[in-house]
Image: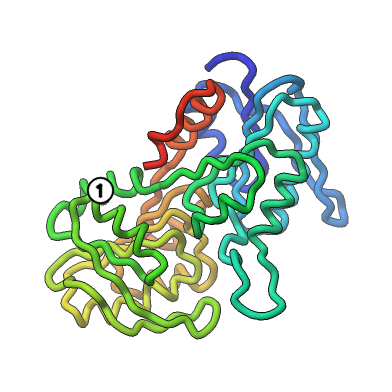
């Protein structure tokens, strides 16, 4: 890598940051991210970063609010250290599910978080699989929005090569599922469901032919696993042979692991945008794929001011 690039990480996903550093062939820069006795976060950059192109890796996963504050304070520290440019590398962007007003007197949290990151001093954002694509427009700075589909589809295509149907868990995910199915030369099915309240989903019907086929249930994230486990009976009733779940972000809030273990899902394929340490021991069905080459290549191209458009497909 050329001179003048620095890679830093908060505490959210240091292992992914180290993998990206290995891909780039550079060390992870030294920073102290600790807390005072009352819980206030304390940041210190322990090396000279003046005039450098800095990439700060920090997923805003659980604990969400703490990781967001770490990100904001690290950006502020870097800005005050006179870096040339700050790119916030946010593999998983939290609060993305609150992207519009669906009820009276509720916030648009995704917009607020985008504003906080911008005001803190970030010059650019690099992220993977936003919950909805329009969140890119919430930022007043450039956003490079990557997709984990190439990583997931390569694995799925090698392991489940015959009679695959890609299933979208709801109407909102049809575009994602259609693009994924096109990569695999597979057919498409859609789950028609109604969500009565947050984290509770009711399956209504299956649109498409899944009889005798391996079904790949595709979503951008798995939170409590309520959606994917409740679709099982509907898919089985329609004659699905095997059911595999695939997603980018393994949020896996309780009781997700327990639900997956008790379900008929054969495998759950995720990426490491969110750390999964300890969860693979509890859930043998979990397969974790790394997005470090994808992010590392994007970082390299951004630093060299070359095109990253080929990484978006």
| Residue in view at x 12 percent, y 70 percent | 212
Would residue 44 be found to the left or right of residue 226 on screen? right
Looking at the rendered image, the quarter that the C terminus falls into is top left
Would residue 185 be found to the left or right of residue 63 on screen? left
Q: Which residue lies furthest to the top in this view?
A: 3
Give SS at disc 1.
Answer: helix
The residue singled out by tag 1 in the image is 183
Q: In this view, does 169 lie above or below 276?
A: below
Toward which corner of the image does residue 243 lie, by quadrant?
A: bottom left
In the image, 153 versus 132, the foreground residue is: 132
Q: In this view, does 9 lie above or below 67?
A: above
In the image, 213 versus 31, the foreground residue is: 213
Q: Is residue 154 above or below residue 168?
A: above
| Residue in view at x 29 percent, y 66 percent | 167
Q: Residues within 10 Å of mark 1 (few under 14, many from 20)?
A: some
Q: Is residue 176 above or below residue 254?
A: above
Q: How is the image coloured?
A: rainbow
**Residue 175 place in picture, x, y as percent:** 35, 59
Query: Quick check: can you spot residue 58?
Result: yes
**Residue 270 place in picture, x, y as percent:** 40, 54
Toward which corner of the image does residue 76 lie, by quadrant?
A: top right
Query: Quick check: can you spot residue 278?
Result: no
Across the whole image, how many numbered discs are drawn on residues? 1
**Residue 289 place in picture, x, y as percent:** 39, 46
**Residue 215 place in picture, x, y as percent:** 23, 65
In the image, 106 versus 287, the foreground residue is: 106
| Residue in view at x 57 percent, y 42 percent | 143
| Residue in view at x 63 percent, y 79 percent | 103
């Amino acid at each position: 890598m050329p001179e003048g690039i620095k890679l830093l990480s908060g505490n959210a996903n240091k292992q992914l940051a180290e993998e990206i550093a290995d891909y780039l062939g550079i060390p992870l820069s030294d920073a102290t991210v600790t807390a005072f006795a009352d819980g206030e976060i304390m940041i210190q950059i322990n090396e000279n970063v003046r005039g450098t192109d800095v990439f700060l890796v920090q997923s805003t996963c659980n604990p969400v609010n703490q990781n967001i504050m770490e990100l904001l304070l690290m950006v502020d520290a870097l800005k005050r250290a006179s870096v040339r440019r700050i790119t916030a590398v946010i593999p998983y962007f939290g609060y993305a599910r609150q992207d519009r007003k669906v009820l009276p007197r509720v916030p648009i949290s995704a917009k607020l978080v985008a504003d906080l990151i911008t005001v803190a001093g970030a010059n650019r954002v690099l992220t993977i699989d936003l919950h909805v694509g329009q969140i890119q427009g919430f930022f007043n700075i450039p956003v490079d929005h990557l997709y984990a589909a190439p990583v997931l589809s390569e694995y799925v295509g090698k392991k489940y090569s015959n009679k695959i149907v890609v299933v979208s868990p709801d109407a909102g995910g049809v575009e994602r599922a259609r693009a994924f199915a096109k990569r695999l030369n597979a057919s498409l099915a859609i789950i028609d469901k109604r969500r009565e309240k947050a984290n509770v989903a009711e399956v209504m019907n299956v649109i498409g032919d899944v009889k005798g086929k391996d079904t790949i249930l595709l979503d951008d994230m798995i939170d409590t696993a309520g959606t994917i486990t409740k679709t099982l009976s509907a898919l089985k009733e329609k004659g699905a042979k095997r059911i595999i779940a695939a997603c980018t972000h393994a949020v896996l809030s309780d009781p997700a692991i327990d639900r997956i273990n008790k379900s008929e899902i054969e495998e759950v394929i995720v990426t490491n945008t969110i750390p999964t340490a300890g969860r693979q021991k509890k859930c043998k069905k979990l397969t974790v794929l790394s997005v470090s080459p994808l992010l590392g290549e994007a970082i390299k191209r951004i630093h060299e001011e070359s095109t990253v458009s080929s990484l978006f497909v």
